Image: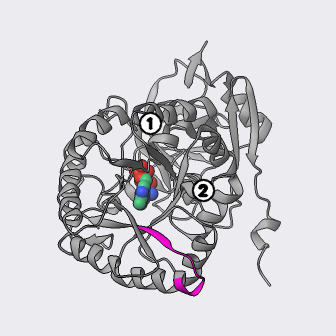
Amino acid sequence: MLQFKKNVLYIEQVKLSDIAKKYGTSTYVYSKNQVINNFENYKKTLCSKDGLICFACKTNSNGGILNLLVKLGAGADTTSGGEIYRCLKAGFNPSKIVYAGVGKTAEEIEYALKSKIFMFNVESFEELDAIDKIASKIKVKAKIAFRINPYVDPDTHSYIVTGKKGTKFGIPYENAVKAYLIAKQKKNIVITGIHSHIGSQILDIGPFKLAAQKIKKVIDAVEKNGIKIEYINCGGGLGIEYEKGQKVLSPKRLMSEIFPIFDKDKKFIFEPGRSIIANAGHLLTKVIYRKVSGGKSFLIVNAGMNDLIRPTLYEAYHEIVPVKKTSAKKVKTDVVGPICESSDFMGKDRMLPVVEQGDFLLVTCAGAYGSAMSSEYNSRPLLAEVLVNGNKSTLIRKRASYSDLLLNEI
Ligand code: LLP
């Protein structure tokens, strides 16, 4: 939904320079229709099966985005009591909320049970005990899936690998059947499914297939013991095209390879995050100063690692585009933020046309794990967020103020 018209960059039908003038910078800008397209790609592929697309709301938990997904029919994949709270506030039906995470506290479990969420994705034996105990205390039954660690390496950045041996996630593969046998004995536990999420920004079908085949083996062994697995939750993880030409998998390809592995009567859950929201959101920022130092060119912008930490944390690549196309010559440039750390950059060694002080730049595909991972480091107030639909823009989060920085201090 980004395109140049007469050398001016638009998101849908709105000029990005107009967004900058109206809402200030830096600002996260989202395309509503891109979110719809991305979600529909999943939905239409899944429609032949009975199942759920649960948006992984850790990627972006802005209520405006969540509410849009509610209207499209999404469920939610959550990972904390706070996320369940946000999802309920945004209008998700609790019966479409699943809850993963290795460290669910007693308070969070009780909150989830009282909120009547659909299912817990249980990640340890002790967590199973805790859920059973709390469910018994408040006299409810808890539906669960075990998150199984299938020991599959998804070949992605090491910080976002979850399905490999030696990570903290899920029930170790060799204990999977034992976990179900133990759960069968628990009075307040209802075994409903099986879950696996092997990692994020995965570009290859191989690891997804291998994980599914290993999960199928667990299901067969579990069902031989008279335990029925109704739902198979395949997690999230589909990669997106951060760099032009990067080959990515479509939901259709993923599902067409996964479905035949399992028996026909199974219901499916997918938990996409990045592939729903990453390419729908961008970080609009402004050049504050330019400088040349040590033979290098720097553009200093007013977005820092507190606003978008992905380049710093994962050395992630986000394409950076001036919102006005010029024929100015291109220079190798580091685009850096105002934070007092050398790790504060949006992009290094980029061939960018010479721009002026005050020009706007767009750091693209920042809709996932952008705003959601932002902080107030260096006492920088959180950014505004804007949703664009056709030729209309709507503020979905107002820019925080200096006084917001002190909000909870005593
Ligand atoms: N389900 C579970 C249980 C997850 O832990 C995650 C992401 C997802 C689904 C969604 O995965 P996706 O479709 O977005 O790949 N902050 C990192 C990514 C962390 C991923 C955490 N888990 C980044 O910026 O690359």
Residue 325 lies in the magenta stretch: no
Q: Residue at x 49, y 77 (%)?
A: 104
Residue 137 lies in the magenta stretch: yes
Residue 27 visible, this angle: no
Which amino acid type corresponds to the residue marked 1 in the rendered image? Tyr
Which amino acid type corresponds to the residue marked 2 in the rendered image? Pro
Q: Earlier in the sequence, mark 1 or mark 2?
A: 1
Where residue 288 appears, as percent x and y from the top left, is 65, 45
Q: Which mark is residue 42?
A: 1
Q: Which residues are magenta?
A: 136-144
Where residue 268 appears, as percent x and y from the top left, is 38, 48
Q: Is residue 178 left or right of residue 123?
A: left
Q: Which mark is residue 338?
A: 2
Q: Is residue 144 above or below residue 153?
A: below
Where disc 1 sits, the SS reads: helix
Q: Is residue 9 left or right of residue 152?
A: right
Identify which residue, 285 or 124, lies in the foreground.
124
**Colouring mode (rainbow / by chain / secondary structure / one colour):** one colour
Identify which residue, 198 or 157, lies in the foreground.
198
Estimate how packed mark 2 is, as few (under 14), some (14 to 19) or many (20 or more) residues with alpha carbons within 10 Å: some
Q: Residue furthest right?
A: 403
Identify which residue, 26 or 366, lies in the foreground.
366
**Image quarter hosting the C terminus:** bottom right
Where disc 2 sits, the SS reads: loop
**Image quarter hosting the N terminus:** top right
Q: Residue at x 30, y 47 (%)?
A: 202
- Determine the CA span between mark 1 and mark 2: 39 Å
Snapshot quadrant of residue 149: bottom left
Ligand 1 sits in which quadrant? bottom left
